[in-house]
Structures are given as structure tokens and as C-alpha cells.
């Protein structure tokens, strides 16, 4: 599979033309970055859709999805982007699905993803680079929504867990402003209650973060939450395994598609 095949499709007169592009933004910490071992991935996800691309900030270019290679120091791991992309590619076979993912393990919403935080600055810069290349190539693109899996590290201290609700509202508003879409769908995974089991870290305030996440979804018509309590993890009770990463990506895709369908009916 070549990168050109991701962008181009046959037209009615047998000439190549650029597919319209649906852009999805992904952000968070380790469970978005990628924690599923590639060797444990189901066979059906070993070959990736030919109409999916992902932005590689290292080479500053779009690339084919492969095994979810846009993972810092985690070449043998993958995140929910795999299940999500497979589902979206099937739903929109005549579009290019373009993924912009910025995620890093251990990062916090209260500091790293705050408006002036290092992760949010990186997110804005990376998104700007990726979209500029689409614009420069005269691509017909739309930013369709954002996926979010984060909050574990904010559960270390009660003050951060309680503040998570307001901090998440600020993030969502900022992303929607960046995308110039006040109704941009925001689909998040709720942090797992398994964090309250024995872990190498301290996530004692998990229930406060979960409540904050629930409140945001309840108060925002275009924000949605996915319960991850039944997902299986590594022995650390924190990082989702391969099957759970696929499930989460698929579920995020289903929720996103439902919302995009509802929005298109207006």
C-alpha cells in the first residue's frame, strides 16, 4: 500500500482524483498513546485500511497507518486508533480518514493539557502543521471530531480530580474554537475503576475524576463518555491490553458515527 493510494481514488473517467478527507483528532495519555501489544492484536486488524493516514510529527508528513507507528518509544504497541480507524474506513470508503494523534503517558489535564501546557501547545502546533499540508495540497477536508482518553494521573490528588470537570470544559471549548466548530463531537473514555486496585502508582482519587468526566458528558450535548470498567489491563491494573484497545477504539467509532449521523440530519 502506498501513501498515494490513501489520498487518491478512481473517478468516473478513469482519472485519479483526491478523496475528500475526514480529519479526527486524538489526545490523552498512555491509554491513547498505545498500550496494546501488536503481537496480541486480532488477525483482522493486522492489515490496515488503504484509505487511512496518520500524521507523523517526526517526519512532518502524512503516512500510512501500519501498526499505529505514531507512538513515542512504543513501536511494538498500538492504541484505540486501530479499532477506530478500521470502523471509520468501512463507513466512509470513498473518503480518506486522516488521524492527528498527540498523546504521552503520565501527562495531566491540570498542567500538561492546560491552555498554556506543554501537551496542549504541542497538540495545537501538530494539528496546525497537519492541516496546513492538507490546505496546501488543496484537499477538501473537514475536522469531524476528537477522541480523548486521559485522566489517570489527575487522580493522584483530590484537588486535581475535582478540578478535572472545569479543566476538561476549558479543553473542549479551546479545541472547538481551534476547529471553528462549537458543536465538534468530543468522545472520551472514562478512566477505569481498576485504578483503585493495586497499581505501581497512586490513583486514590479516581472516583472524583470519573464524576468530573460524567458531569461534562451530562452537561454537553456533543460530549460523550464510554465506560471502561469491564476492560482488561496489564497486571498493573492501569494500561489496557490489546483486546481492550481494539474494543475501546471500536466503541469510540460507534459513538462518533452516531453523533455525526445526528449532526448531518439538521
Image (tube, helix red, strand yellow):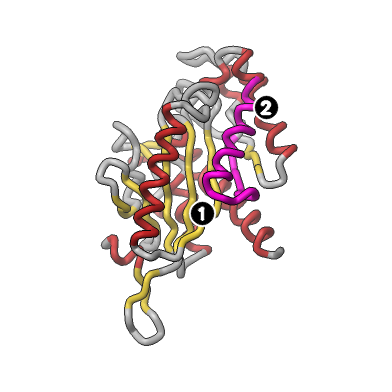
Disc 2/disc 1 C-alpha distance (Å):
26 Å
**Front position in the image: 197 or 139:** 139
* SS under mark 1: strand
Residue 143 marker: 1
Q: Position of residue 252 (x, y in %)?
A: 56, 46
Q: In the picture, residue 124 is in which quadrant?
A: top left
Residue ID for mark 2:
212
The region drawn magenta spans 163-189
In what quadrant of the picture does the N terminus appear? bottom left
Is the C-beta separation of discs 2 and 1 under 8 Å?
no
Tell me: 96 left or right of 176: left
**Front position in the image: 263 or 67:** 263
In the current view of this chain or complex, which residue is farthest to the bottom? Answer: 13
* SS under mark 2: helix
Tell me if mark 1 has few (under 14), some (14-19) or many (20+) residues whose alpha carbon lies within 10 angstroms of its own: some
Tell me if mark 2 has few (under 14), some (14-19) or many (20+) residues whose alpha carbon lies within 10 angstroms of its own: many
Name the main secondary structure of what is drawn in magenta. Answer: helix
Q: Residue at x 45, y 67 (%)?
A: 20
Q: Residue at x 57, y 23 (%)?
A: 194
**Front position in the image: 222 or 177:** 177
Q: Is residue 91 above or below residue 185?
A: below
Q: In the picture, residue 52 is in which quadrant?
A: bottom left
Q: Is residue 168 magenta?
A: yes
Q: Residue at x 53, y 35 (%)?
A: 149
Q: Position of residue 72 (x, y in %)?
A: 32, 33
Q: In the picture, residue 219 is in which quadrant?
A: top right
Q: Earlier in the sequence, mark 2 or mark 1?
A: 1
Q: Is residue 60 magenta?
A: no
| Residue 247 visible to the viewer | no
Amino acid at each position: 500500500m502506498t501513501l498515494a493510494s490513501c489520498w487518491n481514488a478512481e473517478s468516473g473517467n478513469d482519472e485519479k482524483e483526491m478523496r475528500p478527507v475526514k480529519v479526527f483528532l486524538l489526545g490523552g495519555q498512555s491509554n491513547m498513546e498505545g498500550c496494546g501489544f501488536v503481537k496480541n492484536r486480532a488477525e483482522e486488524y493486522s492489515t490496515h485500511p488503504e484509505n487511512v493516514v496518520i500524521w507523523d510529527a517526526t517526519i512532518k508528513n502524512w503516512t500510512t497507518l501500519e501498526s499505529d507507528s505514531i507512538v513515542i518509544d512504543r513501536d511494538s504497541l498500538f492504541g484505540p486508533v486501530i479499532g477506530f480507524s478500521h470502523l471509520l474506513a468501512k463507513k466512509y470508503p470513498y473518503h480518506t480518514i486522516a488521524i492527528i494523534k498527540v498523546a504521552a503517558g503520565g501527562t495531566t489535564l491540570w498542567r500538561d493539557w492546560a491552555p498554556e501546557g506543554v501537551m496542549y501547545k504541542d497538540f495545537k502546533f501538530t494539528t496546525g502543521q497537519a492541516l496546513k499540508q492538507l490546505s496546501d495540497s488543496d484537499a477538501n477536508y473537514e475536522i469531524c471530531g476528537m477522541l480523548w482518553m486521559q485522566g489517570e494521573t489527575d487522580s493522584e490528588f483530590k484537588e486535581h480530580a475535582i478540578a478535572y470537570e472545569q479543566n476538561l470544559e476549558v479543553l473542549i471549548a479551546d479545541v472547538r474554537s481551534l476547529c471553528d466548530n462549537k458543536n465538534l463531537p468530543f468522545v472520551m473514555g472514562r478512566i477505569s475503576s481498576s485504578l483503585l486496585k493495586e497499581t505501581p502508582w497512586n490513583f486514590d482519587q479516581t472516583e472524583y475524576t470519573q464524576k468530573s468526566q460524567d458531569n461534562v458528558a451530562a452537561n454537553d450535548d456533543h460530549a460523550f463518555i464510554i465506560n471502561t470498567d469491564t476492560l482488561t489491563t496489564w497486571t498493573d491494573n492501569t494500561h489496557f491490553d490489546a483486546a481492550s484497545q481494539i474494543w475501546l477504539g471500536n466503541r469510540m467509532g460507534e459513538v462518533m458515527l452516531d453523533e455525526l449521523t445526528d449532526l448531518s440530519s439538521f
